[in-house]
Amino acid sequence: MTSWTWFLRQGPLRRSMGVILVLALGAFMLLPIATMVMWAFADKWHFPGLIPQRFSIRWWKWVFENGNVGRAMVYSFTTAPVVTLLSAVVCVPAAYSFSRMRFPLKRFLFVSLLATNAFPKFGLYISIATLFYRLGLMNTFAGVVLVQLINTLVFMTWIPSAGFDSVGRELEEAARDAGASRWRVFWRVTLPLAMPSIIVAAILAFIAAFDEAQGTLVVGAPKITTMPVLMYTLVANYPEPVSAVFSILLATPSVVLLLIARRYLLAGYLAAGFVR
């Protein structure tokens, strides 16, 4: 038995190491967030100070009074819901088809949806921009919506498909035996039971569209600038507090939506979406 193995087998020492590792992981995850929050309220922060020497909210006022920030927020909170709704209209019927129907190349088509996430996206966005230029979709709202839609296809197909898979066919057959039509069975039995997975997918699709930057930059800039795209400019050309304030504003919707979806995520709907 090596000295290291003997060390790990000691009860109190093992527990102490576990506590230390958890604290180290927590510090690794939380310290950048704490630093960002302090920068957002810092008016003066010079080395070697561990915290700002003076706090202020003047950078928050600057951000909210900046016209570019306001326009970016409007575009972000307009495109993301439209992308989520359009993704649901397109992908939920496809998810039901993958779950309940048999057709050639079904598994291949299902797995091929991962192709949008399997390769570097910037090259894909350049190719899309070339096509959009010929179709007159560059620097348009429709073009930004379509390029953001790419990032939602996997979420809005895989996870609802798993939700439909989890609905027992015996329930649908019982409803049919009671005289319900196929359409009524879908609306009254299948869809309500699969709804938690659709909600989770919609939330993840909204977050993916809201946080998308590269495709929006290539297709929409400079006319349409969303919050993630504007973030590039703020980081490069403005003081750290401005970037910190904007980072908090950009992260808040995602955090709120994930908290809302927490009970569905813990129920295993997300994990189920990637198991077939």
Image (cartoon, rainbow, N blue to C red):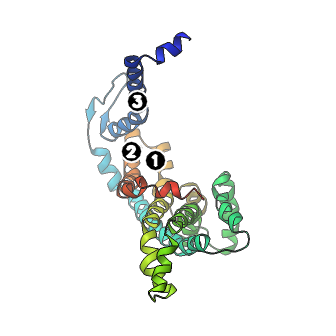
Which of the pair 206/170 is nearer the observer? 170
Instruction: Please state which amino acid type lies under the numbered disc 3.
Output: Val
| Residue type (three-letter) at the residue carrying disc 2 | Val
Q: Which mark is residue 174?
A: none
Give the secondary structure at mark 2: helix
Q: Which residue is mark 1?
A: 234
Say few, some or many: other residues with alpha carbon within 10 Å of mark 2 (under 14 / 14 to 19 / 20 or more). Answer: many
Disc 1, disc 3: CB below 8 Å? Answer: no
Residue at the image position 48 percent from the left and 63 percent from the top: 201
Q: Which residue is mark 2?
A: 242
Q: Quadrant of the C terminus?
A: bottom right
- State whether residue 127 appears in this view: yes
Residue at image mark 3: 22
Numbered disc in front, either 2 or 3: 3
**Secondary structure under badge 1?**
helix
Up the image or down, 260 lies above or below 18; here it is below
